[in-house]
């Protein structure tokens, strides 16, 4: 369950729940969540779309293979052991599970790599005209 501790009612609910778990002697995990904004998510989607349109790859391929595995394995690649074969498998985690700061780093790495390795310039978040043009081109070409 998530609580926004800047809201008084959530503070009380959080305290009550913590006390219940404490008294019951439960094993718990406490984390602080920092989710990225919808604007950041939209921006990421647009630059991935642009790279995909420029290279002819699918957006999903670009997102997994280049953005996550190649440019940002330390942020996105999670290793696990297959219980049947013992083989180490690598699963990319969702960008929805990243913090704002992790995604800022990941996007910057991808932008730099795109320019250096592929010669494709990816616009910065403040380049609204360019980003709007990407939206137009993607919709015109039914590119998702």
Image: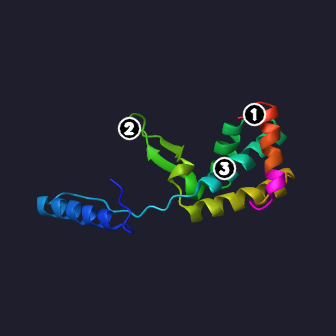
Q: Which residue is drawn at 66% across and 38% down?
A: 60
> Of tags 2 and 1, which is closer to the observer?
1
Instruction: Tell me the residue that label 2 is attached to.
Output: 83
Between the C-alphas of marks 2 and 1, the distance is 38 Å
Residue 108 drawn in magenta: no
- Compared with 13, 143 (above or below) is above
Q: Can residue 122 be seen in this view?
A: no
Task: Name the residue furthest top.
Answer: 142
Give the foreground label among 3 and 2: 3
- The residue shown at (82%, 33%) is 140
The residues bearing labels 1 and 3 have C-alpha atoms spaced at a distance of: 15 Å
Dot placed on the residue nearer the N-terminal end, 1 or 3: 3
Check if mark 2's residue and mark 1's residue have beta carbons within 8 Å: no
Q: Is 65 left, or right, of 137 in this rendering?
A: left
Sort mark 1 into few (<14), some (14-19) or many (20+) by Cα contacts within 10 Å. Answer: some
Which residue in the protein does label 3 denote?
42
Residue drawn 68% across the image and 46% down it: 45
The answer to which image quadrant residue 111 occupies is: bottom right
Horizontal arrangement in the rendering, residue 140 relative to residue 74 (left or right) = right
First to last magenta residue range: 125-131
Q: Where is residue 107 in the image (x, y as percent from the top left)?
A: 68, 58
The circle drawn on residue 143 is: 1
Whether residue 24 appears in this view of the structure is yes
Q: In which quarter of the image is residue 5?
A: bottom left
Residue 81 lies, with reference to residue 109, above or below; the image says above
Between 31 and 127, which is closer to the camera in this rendering? 127
Disc 3 element: helix
In the picture, measured across the screen, residue 116 lies left or right of residue 76, that is right
Instruction: Name the element at disc 2.
Output: loop
Looking at the figure, which quarter contains the C terminus?
top right
Q: Are marks 3 and 2 in contact (CB under 8 Å)?
A: no
* Rendered location of residue 94, percent (x, y): 54, 47
């Amino acid at each position: 369950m998530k609580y926004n501790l800047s809201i008084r009612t959530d503070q009380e609910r959080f305290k009550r729940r913590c006390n219940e778990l404490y008294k019951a002697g439960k094993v718990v995990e406490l984390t602080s969540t920092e989710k990225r904004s919808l604007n950041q998510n939209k921006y990421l989607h647009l630059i991935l779309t642009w790279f995909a349109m420029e290279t002819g790859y699918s957006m999903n391929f670009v997102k997994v293979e280049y953005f996550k595995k190649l440019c940002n394995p330390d942020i996105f690649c999670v290793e696990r052991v297959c219980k049947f074969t013992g083989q180490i498998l690598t699963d990319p985690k969702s960008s929805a599970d990243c913090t704002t700061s992790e995604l800022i780093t990941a996007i910057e790495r991808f932008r730099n790599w795109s320019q250096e390795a592929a010669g494709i310039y990816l616009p910065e978040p403040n380049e609204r005209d360019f980003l709007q043009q990407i939206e137009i081109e993607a919709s015109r070409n039914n590119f998702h």
